[in-house]
Image (cartoon, grey):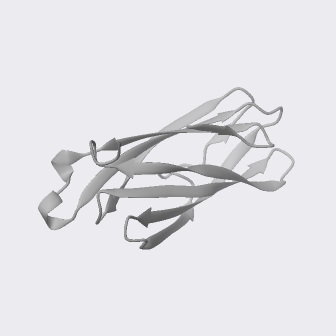
């Protein structure tokens, strides 16, 4: 999935189910997700923090907030990209993630970039 915000920031997501780390009989479903952030704008932008809303199939919601991503606060110059992989654990076979990044442009103005909702699903569960 890809979405361009008003500051020229493009977010792309890719999800993988990790059966080797999951325990389906114990209701533990592990997913990795790879996020690609591309700056198509005209000014540099630094990723300051993240906010995730993770919802499982039973409508249980986890909120995650923190500085940067994977221990970094990348600075993206125009036309630059940053990609990282992280993970989450659900107690159901299906769930969703959405959120936002707080960023700052080279003039010190802060802005939020929406991370569009994406689906976490064990293969062959959703049609």
Q: Residue furthest left?
A: 25
- Which residue appears at 39% of the width and 51% of the height? 120
Labels in figure, total:
0
In the rendered view, tell whether residue 11 sits above or below residue 70: above
Q: Decide which of 85, 14 is in the foreground and name it.
A: 14
Q: Position of residue 19 (x, y in %)?
A: 20, 47
Q: Position of residue 18 (x, y in %)?
A: 25, 46
Q: Along the horizontal axis of the image, is 11 left or right of 44?
A: left
Which quarter of the rendering shows the N terminus?
A: top right
Q: Position of residue 45 (x, y in %)?
A: 74, 43
- Which residue appears at 52% of the width and 51% of the height? 69
Q: Decide which of 98, 102 is in the foreground and name it.
A: 98
* Quadrant of residue 75 within the rendered picture: top right
Q: Along the horizontal axis of the image, is 10 left or right of 91?
A: right
- Which residue appears at 15% of the width and 66% of the height? 26
Q: Along the horizontal axis of the image, is 30 left or right of 119?
A: left
Q: Decide which of 50, 56 is in the foreground and name it.
A: 56
Q: Along the horizontal axis of the image, is 120 left or right of 98?
A: left
Q: Residue furthest front?
A: 127
* Quadrant of residue 38 within the rendered picture: top right
Which quarter of the rendering shows the C terminus?
A: top left
Q: Position of residue 30 (x, y in %)?
A: 28, 54
Q: Residue furthest bottom?
A: 60
């Amino acid at each position: 999935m890809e979405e361009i915000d008003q500051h020229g920031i493009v977010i792309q997501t890719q999800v993988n189910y990790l059966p080797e780390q999951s325990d389906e009989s114990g209701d533990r479903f592990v997913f990795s997700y790879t996020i690609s952030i591309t700056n198509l704008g005209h000014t540099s932008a630094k990723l300051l923090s993240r906010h995730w809303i993770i919802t499982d199939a039973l409508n249980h919601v986890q909120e995650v907030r923190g500085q940067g991503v994977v221990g970094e606060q990348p600075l993206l110059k125009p036309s630059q990209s940053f990609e990282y992989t992280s993970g989450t654990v659900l107690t159901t076979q299906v769930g969703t993630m959405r959120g936002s990044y707080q960023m700052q442009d080279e003039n010190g103005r802060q802005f939020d970039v929406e991370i569009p909702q994406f689906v976490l699903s064990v293969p062959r569960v959703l049609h």
